[in-house]
Image (spheres, helix red, strand yellow):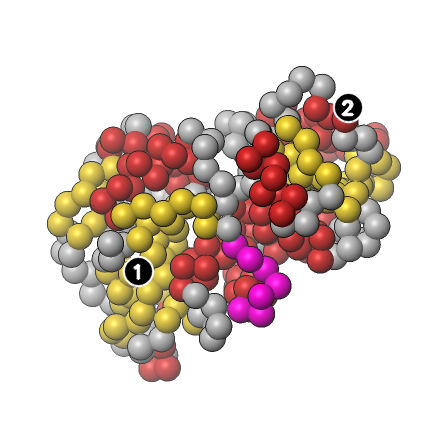
């Protein structure tokens, strides 16, 4: 099969197309004929340094999320999955390929009415957005600041917070990204690349911090007493790292999405169902062929992308 190999950590050029043996599903696993592979900022960090939530020995085929059709079952895998359109998480290994093996427990059937590429776009980012929303609990009438509002998670958080009745302030870099956030329902928008951007926002009740660093720390300073901040990303290269005592001193709460297997599965299923119902629209801003995985990583790291970046594996 065709695949992308990672044989050393480094810049995007270390992602090299090549042949790989066809994988075989083991007990409790399924084989997926992959049509779309997810790409995320976390994957670019892993490729560059080996850091992050994934643990794998080189050489390897990277890739954490896929969408396709189940073509074979390992012993004990549910028979009802055979032939189904599914999305699946792979623990960071094997996704950038024409075939991938996934644990049956990590597979989600794609609901009728939801396109497969949209389901892949909702797999990791939709799950994350739902978990963050559940943790921060934005209420009707509250002002909610969404950082990186034109990114994969940010575009979904804007929609979810608007649906909850909140007034959304979108923070992003550049007018193109701000216009996208407005089109998704954000009532206010601010370019956080401009000096003094936080002064133009004013007090907020909730911060969804997908950037970290100085931007995340500036956003923390905008919270009213009783506010909530959820830091889930580090696009700036570092976490906001707000001390718990600083939050307590200001009467605000630092929250985090629940990460138990049950919570992750529930959040993924909810995001897929909302997508199928037309209430949650993933923005797929960039598509690359499988052989162009290095270009996809370059685009993500350049901060030129909007929404989700997908690999079209069959192209």
> Please, which residue is most extreme toward the top here?
195
Q: Position of residue 17 (x, y in %)?
A: 18, 43
Which of the marked residues, 2 or 1, is nearer the chain's N terminus?
A: 1
Q: Does the magenta stretch include residue 97?
A: no
Closer to the camera in the image, 188 or 39: 188
Residue 82 x/y as whole percent: 31, 78
Q: In which quarter of the image is residue 126?
A: bottom right
Name which residue lies at 45% across and 32% down.
304
Q: Quadrant of the C terminus?
A: bottom left
Q: Locate residue 235 relative to residue 64 in the image: left or right.
A: right
x 46%, y 50%: residue: 284
Q: Which of 198 and 52 is in front in this view?
A: 198
From where the camera sits, is residue 243 visible? no
Q: Name the residue under label 1.
A: 35
Under circle 1, the secondary element is strand
Determine the CA span between mark 2 and mark 1: 45 Å
In the picture provided, is 135 more to the left or to the right than 70?
right
Kindly give the residue lying farthest to the bottom in the view shown. 79
Q: Is residue 8 above or below residue 76?
A: above
Q: Is 286 situated left or right of 206 in this image?
A: left
278 is within the stretch colored magenta: yes
Q: How crowded is mark 1: few (under 14 residues within 10 Å), some or many (20 or more)?
A: many
Residue carrying label 2: 199
The magenta-colored residue range is 276-282
**Label 2: how many Cα within 10 Å (few below 14, some 14–19, many 20+):** few
């Amino acid at each position: 099969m065709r695949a992308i190999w990672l044989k050393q950590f480094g810049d995007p050029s270390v992602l090299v197309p090549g042949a790989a043996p066809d994988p075989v599903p083991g007990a409790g696993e399924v084989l997926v004929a992959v049509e779309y592979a997810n790409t995320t900022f976390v994957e670019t960090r892993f490729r560059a340094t080996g850091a992050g939530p994934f643990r794998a020995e080189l050489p390897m085929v990277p890739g954490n999320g896929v969408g396709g059709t189940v073509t074979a079952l390992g012993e004990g895998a549910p028979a009802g999955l055979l032939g189904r359109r599914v999305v699946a998480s792979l623990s960071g290994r094997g996704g950038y390929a024409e075939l991938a093996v996934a644990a049956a427990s990590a597979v989600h059937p794609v609901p009728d009415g939801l396109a497969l590429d949209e389901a892949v776009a909702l797999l990791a980012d939709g799950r994350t957005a739902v978990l963050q929303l559940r943790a921060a609990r934005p209420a009707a009438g509250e002002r909610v600041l969404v950082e990186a509002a034109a990114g994969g998670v940010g575009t979904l958080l804007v929609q979810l917070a608007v649906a909850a009745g909140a007034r959304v302030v979108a923070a992003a870099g550049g007018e193109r990204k701000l216009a996208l956030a407005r089109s998704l329902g954000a009532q206010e928008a601010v370019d956080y690349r401009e000096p003094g951007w936080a002064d133009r926002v004013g007090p907020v009740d909730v911060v969804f911090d997908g950037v970290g660093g100085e931007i995340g720390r500036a956003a923390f300073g905008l919270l009213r007493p009783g506010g909530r901040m959820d830091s889930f990303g580090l696009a700036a290269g570092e976490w906001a790292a707000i001390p718990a005592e600083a939050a307590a001193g200001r009467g605000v709460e630092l929250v985090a999405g629940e990460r138990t297997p049950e919570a992750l599965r529930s959040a993924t299923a909810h995001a897929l169902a909302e997508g199928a119902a037309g209430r949650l629209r993933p923005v797929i801003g960039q598509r690359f062929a499988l052989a162009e995985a290095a270009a996809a990583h370059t685009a993500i790291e350049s901060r030129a992308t909007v929404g989700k970046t997908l690999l079209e594996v069959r192209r």
